Image (tube, grey):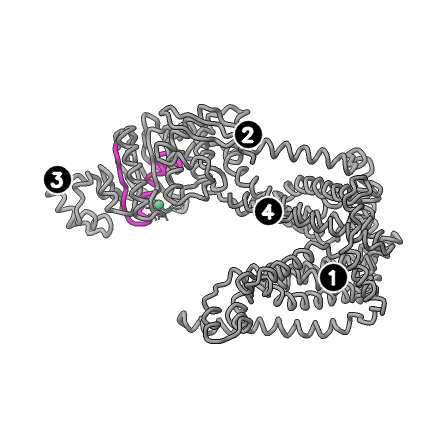
Amino acid sequence: MIEFTNVDKVYPNKVKALQNINLKIEKGEFVAVIGLSGAGKSTLIRCINRMHDITHGSLIVDGTDVGKIKGKEIRNFRKRIGMIFQSFNLITRTTVIKNVLVSFVPQLPFWRKMTGLFSKRHKLKALTALDQVGILDKAYVRVDQLSGGQQQRVALARTLAQNPDILLADEPIASLDPVTSKQVMDDFQRINQDMDMTVILNIHHVEVALEYADRIIGVREGQIVYDGPAHDVTEEVLDYIYKGKAEEVKQEMDEEGVYV
Amino acid sequence: MNAIEKQLYAKPRSNVYIYIISAILIGLIIGSVFVIDFESMGNSGWTIAKNILLGIVTPDLDLLLNFTTQGVMYLLLETIAIAFLGTIIGVLLAIPLAFLSASNVVPKPISWITRLLLIVIRTIPSLVYGLMLIRVTGPGPFAGVLTIAIVSIGMLAKLFVDAIEDLDTSIFESMTSIGCTTFEKIRFGIIPQLTAMFLSIGIYRFDMNLREASILGLVGAGGIGAPLIFAMNSYRWNEVGSILIGLVILILIVEIWSNNMRNKLVRG
Amino acid sequence: MFDKIFPPEKIVLPNGKTVLEKRSRTPLLFIIVLLGTFLSIRFTNFDFNVLVKRGHEFFVIINDMIPPKWDYFPSIWQPLLDTIMMSILGSTLGSLVSIPVAYLAATNMIKNKVVVMVARLFLSILRTMPTLVSALIATFIFGLGTLAGTVAIFLFTLAYVGKLLYEQIENASLDAFEAMESIGMTRVQAFRYAIFPQVLPNYLSTSLFCFEGNVRYAAILGYVGAGGIGLLLNEGLGWRDYASVGMVLLMLAITVFLIETVSEYFRKKLI
Ligand SMILES: Nc1ncnc2c1ncn2[C@@H]1O[C@H](COP(=O)(O)OP(=O)(O)OP(=O)(O)O)[C@@H](O)[C@H]1O
Ligand SMILES: [Mg+2]
C-alpha cells in the first residue's frame, strides 16, 4: 500500500512541484496519472521510489517510511519497485538478455559482479520474464535491432525479472505508435491482473488511460484535482484537469457525489 | 525577417565561402607550381619507371613464397607483430589519457594539459620517434613496437574521448531505480557500452598501424620496410615487386577484415 | 563457423519452452588476443627490462630538443613552405583527378563491370601503398626533390578521395540523373548536373580533410629525398643536432595546428 500524507515537493530552484498531496493506493490497483505537461506527474511517481526526495509530509510504501531511509536502505527499498521510462533506458549495444539480467546486479556476489557471469538460475528468470512479455525469441538479439515497442517490452521484462510489488511507469507509450502502444498497455494490464502487481503510470493519452486504468488521478499545478474511478471521468472532469474550469466542475461533482 | 527571407539571405553566404576557398586555392596552386622543381626529372626517369613496372609484374616468387627469416612471409609476420603489439600498448596507454582529457571526468585544467600533450605527441612524425627510440632499444622490431605505440596514442585517445563523451547515460536512471550502486552502474552500464566502441577503435588503428609499421624499416625499426629499401637502392625491382605485392595483399585483407569486424561491433 | 565448433547451449524454461544460447565469443577473443600478444612479444624481442633500464635515453633526446635552436628559423621556412606547397598541389591535383576515376568506379554510373573492377582495384592498390614508399619510388623516377613528393601526395589523395567519392556517388539519389538522361543529355552531362552537385560539399570536405593529413605526411617525405622539411629532420637527426630538430618539430607542430584549425573551420562551413 502507498500512502501520501500532506506531501510537498519543492525543487532546489524553488519550483513547487507537489503541494499537499494526500493519496492512498491499495495493492493491485491500476492507476493512471493524467495532467498537463509540467503538472507534476513525473515528480509524483518518482517520489514513490525515492528518485526524488519529498520536502514535507510523509510517504509510506508497504510499511517503509520513504522519507526516512538512507543509503543502502534506499537501494534495498528500490529493488521492490520496478520502473519503466519513456525512453526505455536500455544498453542498446548489448543483447536483450544482458539488459534483463541487469535487474539482478544488486544481489550478485562480488566475483560475479567483476566477471559479469550470471548464474543459470538468473538466466532462467530473465528468460521467463522475456517470455511473459512475448519476446523470448529475441533474447540473444542486440537491442538496437529491435523496434521501439519491442524495446519497451525489454524494459518491462527487466522490471518483471526484478519481481517487484509495485510497477511505476513514466509515460511508457509516449514514443510508440498507437498499435504498439496497445500491445504494451495490454502487457501492463496482464501483469496487473495475473500477478496482482500495483501499476501506477503517467500518461498523456487520455483515452488509453480511461480504457485500461481502474482509477484516474488528475494532477494540476502540483495538486490532485481529481481522484476517482475511470468510468466516472466525464468531459467536464477532463476539462477541469486540463483547463481548470474549477468552479463549474466542482459543483457538478459535488452534485454527483464524486470525491475530489 | 521571416523564415523565407532568412533562407534567401543565407544562401549566398555559403557561396561566398566557396568563392573564398576557390580563390585562395587557385592562388596557392599557382604559387606552388613555381616552388615545385620540375627540372629534377632526368631522362633516365622513364627507363626506371619501365623497369619498376616490369619488376612488379614479374615478381621474385621465390622470395614471396619463402618461409625463412629472409622471406616476404616472415617479414610480413614481423610487421604484423609490430603493429599488433604496438596497438595493444597504445590502447593501454591511451585509455588513462582519454579519461584524463575528458572534460566531464576531470577538472578543466587537467583536461586541457592532457589535450595539449596529446596534440604535441600527435604532430611528431613517426620516423622521428623511431630514431629516438632506437637509442633506447637498439635497431630492430622492438623499437618499432614502441614507435607504433606512441604514434597511436594521440588518435586513440581522441577517439576514446569522443566515445566517452558520447555515452548514453539514460541507463543510469533505470539502474538507479533498480537499486544499483555507482560501481555497479559503471560495471554494467558503462563498460558494456565502451568495450564495443573501444574495440572497434582499436581495430581501426591496427589497420593504420600496419601501414605505419611497413615504413619503419626505413629508420631501422624492424618490419618489411628495410628489405624494401635495400632492394630499391640496389635496383632489384623483382624483389621490390614481390615485397610490394605481399604488402598490398596483406593490407587489403586486414582492411576488409577490420571493416567487417567494426561493422559487426558497432551495428551488431 | 564458430557455432559449429561450439554448438549453442539449449536452455529449457520451467514452462517447457526452449531457447538456444550461443556460446559467448569473449573467452575465445580473449585467448586470441593473449596469444597474439605473447607471439608478438617473441617476434619483436620486446623486453620490458630494457625499457626500464634504458627508457631514460628517450628523454635525454627530448631534453636536448628543449630549448629549440631559435636562430635555425631562417633556414627552416623555405623547406617548410616547400612542404606546404607540395601538399597543396598534390592534394588539389589528386582531388581533381579522383573525380573521373570515382565516376568510373561507381556501379550506378558505369554499367560495365570490368571497368568498375579495374578502377576499384587501381584505387585500392594505390591506397594501400604507404605514402613514403610511393615517394621513394617517385624519387627514382622523378629524381630527388619536391616533384617526387608531390607525385606521392597526388597518388595518395587520388586514392583516398576517389574511394570516398565513388561511395558517395553510389549513395546519391538518381531521380534527377534519370530525368536529365531522358531529355537527351549524355551520362557524363547528367552526372555533371544531377549527381555532382549532390556530392560536392562532401567531396570538398573530404579533400580538405585529406589535405590536412597530407601536410603531416609531406613533412617526412623529405626523409627519403622527396623534398620539404623532412630533409632537415633527416640531417638534424643524423648529426644528432637535436636542438635544431626541436626547432623543426616546433615549427611543424605550429603549422599543422594552424592548417588543421583553418581547414576544420571551412569543413564545418561546407557541410
Ligand atoms: N529536476 C528538477 N529540478 C527543478 N525543477 C524541476 C525538476 N523536475 C521537474 N521540475 C519542475 O517541476 C514541475 C513538475 O515537473 P514534472 O516533470 O513532474 O511534470 P510532468 O507532469 O511530468 O510533465 P510532463 O508531462 O512534461 O512530463 C515543472 O514545473 C518542472 O519544471
Ligand atoms: Mg514527466
Q: Residue B27, relative to residue A124: is it above or below?
A: below
The answer for how far apart the CA atoms under marks 2 and 1 are is 48 Å
Alpha-carbon distance for marks 1 and 3? 89 Å
Residue toward you, A12 or B103: B103
From mark 4 to mark 3, how far is it between C-alphas? 62 Å
CB atoms at circles 2 and 4 under 8 Å apart? no
Picture layout, residue C15 above or below residue C159: above
Three-letter amino acid code at disc 3?
Gly
Residue occupied by mark 1: C152
Chain under callout 2: C
Q: Are marks 4 and 3 in contact (CB under 8 Å)?
A: no
Label annotation for residue A257: 3
Foreground: disc 2 or disc 1: 2
Amino acid type of the residue that numbered disc 2 sits on in the rendered structure: Phe
* Residue A167 relative to residue C117: left or right: left
Amino acid type at circle 4 is Val
